Image (cartoon, rainbow, N blue to C red):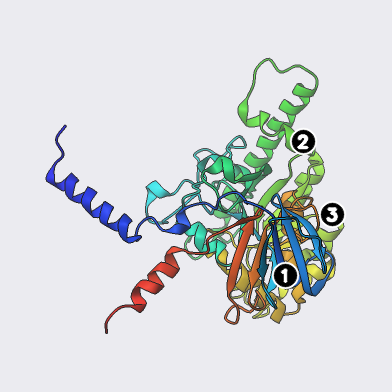
Amino acid sequence: MKLSNTCLSLIVALAGSISAGQSLANDMVPAKAATGPLLLTGVTLHTVTAGVSSNTDLLIVDGKIAAIGQGLTVPEGATVLALDGKHVYPGLIALANQLGLTEIDAVRSTDDTNEVTQTNPDIRAKVAYNADSEVIPTIRSNGFAYAMVYPSGSMLMGQSSLMQLDAWNYQDAVVADGTGLHVRWPNADSLGSRWNPKPADEVRKANAAQLEKLQQHFKSAKAYFDAEQAGLNKGIDSRWQAMLPVFKGERPLFVHADDARQIRQAMLLAKEYGVKLNIVGGRDSWRMADELAAAKVAVIYTAPYGLPTRGDENYSQAFITPKVLQDAGVEYALSLDGYWDTRNVVFAAGQAISFGLTPEQALRSVTINAAKIAGVADKIGSIEVGKAASLVVSDGDIFDYLGHKVTHLWIDGRAVDLNNHHKQMHDKYQQRIN
């Protein structure tokens, strides 16, 4: 078989890039398994659940946190890493995003976020997850070890999965599968938007029709569930089969809704069918924080900064909302519903501190609170003996966006390379001759 001159040129160019380390960088190679015990010494430990400990040590064995304190008994052959004065946090958790499902917004072939039709509860986001995404290392370098990815679309969108961010493929990455069924709630705005100049009555009727259609989907799914319980189903409908865990209380609903009217409608539906409800988005959650707390509805708040959405709102409402939820007793996590901008969740948490949250509360919003909402708080989300050794090290306050640097990251006891494409481009253009 003969190769064309063009093919040969491409091969030579690729070989040259690889030899120069320009195309296949270290950030594309997942970490190797932990090779032995590791002792971190002299650190400031932000445990999340048991306060902050200064000048303490932490022992990692077999990918788990084995011991915490001073004067620890160290196994033979352990590696000792002195991190005197540095801050150690649990690996951060980003909920409800599409990291690894899309690479470039403008290139359709790299976007694997959506499915057709409005009834896709059997769709699983994990199978579309690209562990080789160039975006993932940029998120890791800001301290994130986990992301809960979900399929987008309309109405019954599909199931999310919690992924660890240092893997060869999606099978390696999955930490928890089927963490929730994601539902896009129909728009409640009868006035439409500035991009939708249709008359208000027409928009109102369209929204009502969409809501009725969604409610009909739930009626069909519940009828299927009842028939399944009674042994009357003669065949399998994969859509409603995937919703059996929802009606059994084994899989929560993650309803994507911002408007207070949408949220209340979702709460009524959850009460009618006796299902566990979480809200994703929650722009108006501050308006009904007491109701959410009383109903034990958790919020993944994805609007932590930006301009007010209504003319009569406080200019800083987006920043104040986490404090309102905290004071009302709502279980909440901070996140951003995107993919590349997930790294900015750390910045959002820092802003929330400026508007009322304590640093401890902000840390909980991206660690243990997120782990609880994802159903994995027994494994990750805090620094406790027996939990996964997923840890991030910073040379300062991790929420001081300009005053700190993430220096180390471990996921399940494996050291993760913090190199990424952004750093490579920075280093490249530092060498440019003016």
Residue visible at 68% across and 56% down in the picture:
77
- Observer-nearest of 89 and 335: 89
When the figure is inspected, residue 1 is found, relative to residue 185, above or below; the finding is above
When the figure is inspected, residue 96 is found, relative to residue 213, above or below; the finding is below
Residue 247 has which mark?
2
Return the residue found at the far bottom: 434
Give the x, y percent position of residue 414: 61, 54
Residue 41 has which mark?
1
Residue visible at 75% across and 64% down in the picture:
58
Residue 295 has which mark?
3
Secondary-structure class at tag 3: loop
Q: What quarter of the picture does the C terminus occupy?
A: bottom left
Left or right of 270, for residue 7? left
Say if mark 1 contacts mark 3, CB within 8 Å. no
Give the Cα separation between the discs numbered 1 and 2.
Answer: 48 Å
Residue 417 has which mark?
none
First along the sequence among labels 1 and 3: 1
Give the Cα separation between the discs numbered 1 and 3.
Answer: 44 Å
Foreground label between 1 and 2 = 1
Secondary-structure class at tag 1: strand
Foreground label between 1 and 3 = 1
- Label 3: few (<14), some (14–19) or many (≥20) C-alpha neighbours in 10 Å: some
- Amino acid, disc 3: Ala
- Amino acid, disc 1: Thr
- Observer-nearest of 285 and 251: 251
Left or right of 275, for residue 209? left
Give the Cα separation between the discs numbered 2 and 3.
Answer: 17 Å
Residue visible at 12% across and 46% down in the picture:
5
Left or right of 288, for residue 126? left
Say if mark 2 contacts mark 3, CB within 8 Å. no
- Amino acid, disc 2: Phe
